Amino acid sequence: MDHALHWQKSTFSGGGEGDTCIELAATPTALHLRESEDPGTRLTTGTAPVAHLIRGLKSGRFRTS
């Protein structure tokens, strides 16, 4: 199913050899995440949980200090 997904790396990854990065592929109903060094292992989730996480991060809810 890789051919159906368009994987993107963060622009912060630097693109050099040996860099590790989280890659993201989106479909209308799901977000797929994988580690660039281990592309066979993936996490798939809906868009609502990710939106909730981003709102929490922006609000400072997850700060430890």
Image (cartoon, rainbow, N blue to C red):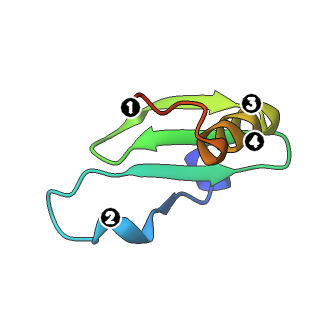
Q: Are marks 1 and 3 in contact (CB under 8 Å)?
A: no
> Can you tell which of label 4 and label 2 is closer to the viewer?
4
State the SS at label 4: helix
Determine crowd level at label 1: few under 14, some 14-19, many 20+ residues with C-alpha closer than 10 A. few
Q: Position of residue 4 (x, y in %)?
A: 67, 53
In front of the other: 48 or 19? 48
> CA–CA distance between discs 3 and 2?
24 Å
State the SS at label 2: helix
In front of the other: 40 or 63? 63
| Residue labelled with disc 1 | 65
Query: Residue 49: which numbered mark, if any?
Result: 3
User: Which residue is painted at 60% across and 60% down in the image?
Assistant: 6
Q: Position of residue 19 (x, y in %)?
A: 21, 57
> CA–CA distance between discs 4 and 1?
23 Å
11 left or right of 28 in image: left
State the SS at label 1: loop
Q: Quadrant of residue 38?
A: top left
Name which residue type carries label 4.
Ala
Name which residue type carries label 3.
Pro
First of labels 4, 1 by sequence position:
4
Q: Are marks 3 and 4 in contact (CB under 8 Å)?
A: yes
First of labels 1, 3 by sequence position:
3
Is 51 placed above or below 40 here? below
User: Which residue is painted at 53% across and 40% down in the image?
Assistant: 33
Quarter of the figure with the N terminus: top right
Is 18 placed above or below 56 here? below
| Residue labelled with disc 4 | 51
Name which residue type carries label 2.
Ser
